[in-house]
Amino acid sequence: MGYIKKAHRKILQILDNTSSLPNGWDKFVDKQAVYHNLIIKSAKNKCFCTNCKNYFISQKKINQEVKCPYCRNTYLIRRSNLKYQEFKDYLSILDKVNNTLVIRYFELKIVIDAIHERHTSVVEFAREMVADNRYGELYANERVSRCLQYVHIFHEIGDFINAKKWRQCTRCYSLIDYSIVFPNNIKNLLKDTDYKYSCIWDIAKHSTYIDLSQMLKEKKQIPIVEMLCKMKLYNLAQKANEFKNFGSFQKIFGVSKDYYEFMKKHNITYVQLKILKLLQEKNIRKIHYLEKYVSYGSNTTNLEEITEYISLNRFIKYSKMCQEKVDTYLYKDYLRFAKLLGFDLKNNKYAFPKNLREEHDKLSEQYKIQNKKIICDLIKKRGKELSLNKYQNKKFIIFPALSIESLKDESKQQNNCVRTYAEKYAAGTCDIYFMRDINKPKESLVTIEVKNNSVVQSRIKNNDDPSKKQLQFINKWEREVLKGVA
Ligand SMILES: [Zn+2]
C-alpha cells in the first residue's frame, strides 16, 4: 500500500485512460512468443511443432532440442502426454507522460495445454517512474500477488482484481529487474533529454534482457554507454559501470585490440569478457563451456584462482574427464594445497585428481600438519628469488619479504592484513615487497603487493595510500626493475 505522489497518481491515470500501445508492439510480442514453443513427440518418433503445427520424424530424445524442418526454429522435445506447460517473460515499454519517463512492465504468458494448443496473453502489471541517481518509484496493480516472496501475476481479471488500482512497491523486493525492452520508440522519446546520444535504443535492439531502469538511473555512465554502443558492444554497454571511456583498448577491456572483432561478432557479455581475459583465446565455444562454471552474480573468482595454477584449457580437459561436474571451489582449494605441498601440477596425475573430494581432503589434512614448516620454507625460498628485484636510491629501498616473521612484523607495524597473504606469497601467486627509508630499514613504510610483475597494491600504515614521492619511487621501480624497461 502506501501513499502515491499526486504527480505520479496523475501519470498513472493518464496511462490508464489511453489504451493505445506503440506501433509495432503486437509484432514485437509475437516475435518474443515464437521462442516459447515445444516439439511434442508421440509414438514412432512422430513430432509435432506447436509453432508451425507441422509434423515430422526425428530420432532425438525427450528433453533434447530439435530443429523443426518447417519453421526452422529449435525447440525442446516433450512427451505427448504433456498436460500443461507454461512460459513467462517480462516485456517492457518506455513511455513519456508529462515529461516524466515511465517504464511499463508486462508479463507475457504462454500456456501449452493437454491438446497441445497454445494460449498467449500479455498483461501490464507494473510501472516505474524514472528518476536520476536512484531507483524511481515503482507501482504495481492488483494483478500482482506476492506470497512467500514468490511473485504471481494474474492474467484473468475477476471481481477481486482491479488492473487500474495501483500501489507503491519497493524495488528491492526484486519484482522486476531485467526485461525484454520494446526498442522502436526509444530513440524518439529520448530525443530532447540528457539521453539523446545514449544509443540505449541500440542495446534494446541487440540485447535480450535489459535492466532499463538501472541504465537510465546512471546518467553519468551515459557517455560510456554511448562509446560501447558505437563500438557495437551492446551487451557490454549494459555493464557500463564496469568500464571507463578513456585510455587504451587494453586498459579499458583488459585484452588487446586484436580481440575487438571477436568481441563485436559475438556481442560478448561482461561475464564472457572476464572469461576471455583468463582464456586469452578467440574461441566462443570454450567461453560458452566455461560460462557454466560462473556462479550467480557473474562471479568468476573460482576460475580466476584456478588459472593461477593451471591454464583454462587444461581445466576444460579436466572438466570433460569429470562429466562437466567439477566443484570449482573445491578444485581451486585442491590446487592450492597441491602447489604448497610441492606436487608438480604440470603433471596431469596431480592436476587432475580422479576423486576430487577425497584427494582434496587428503591434501588438506597433510597440509594442516605441515603447513607452518612448509610456508616458512617456501617464503624463505621466494624471498631469495625475489631479492633480484631489490632496488634503492639515496632515500628509499625496496626488498621482498624474506621470512614469515618479517611478514608478521610488517603486519603488526602497519596494522594491515599482509599476514594473511603469507600463504599466497608462499604459493607464488603474489609477491610481497617492503619499501623502507634507507636510514631506517627496520621501520615499515609501504607494503607492496605485486602480481605478474605489476604493482596491484601499495599501502602505508592503516591501509592508507602512499605519498606522491613514495609513489614516484614505486613507479620507477615497477618500470625499470619489474618490467625491465630502461
Ligand atoms: Zn515448426
Image (cartoon, helix red, strand yellow):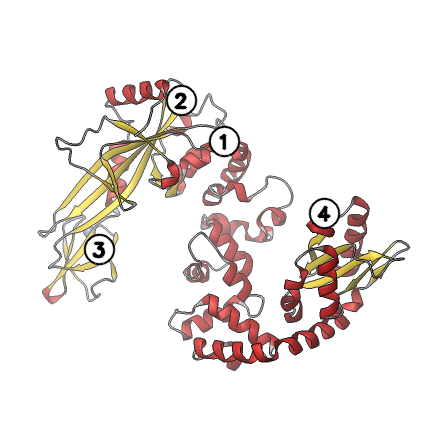
Which comes before the other along the chain, label 3 or label 2?
Answer: 3
**Residue under circle 3?**
68
Residue 465 tag number: 4
Q: Could you tell me how far apart the alpha carbons at marks 3 and 2 are, in whole angstroms?
A: 45 Å
Nearer to me, 354 or 281: 354
Q: Amino acid at mark 1?
A: Asn
Q: Amino acid at mark 4?
A: Asp
Tag 2's secondary structure? Answer: strand
Q: Quadrant of the N terminus?
A: top left
Q: Could you tell me how far apart the alpha carbons at marks 2 and 4 are, in whole angstroms?
A: 43 Å
Tag 1's secondary structure? Answer: loop
The residue depicted at 54 percent of the width and 44 percent of the height is 242
The residue depicted at 46 percent of the width and 66 percent of the height is 328
Residue 459 tag number: none
| Picture quadrant where residue 405 is located | bottom right
Tag 3's secondary structure? Answer: loop
| Picture quadrant where residue 19 is located | top left
| Picture quadrant where residue 136 is located | top left
Q: Could you tell me how far apart the alpha carbons at marks 2 and 1 are, in whole angstroms?
A: 15 Å
Q: Crowding at label 2, few (<14), some or many (≥20) Cα neighbours within 10 Å?
A: some
Side (left or right) of 32 relative to 467: left
Nearer to me, 391 or 482: 391
**Residue under circle 2?**
100
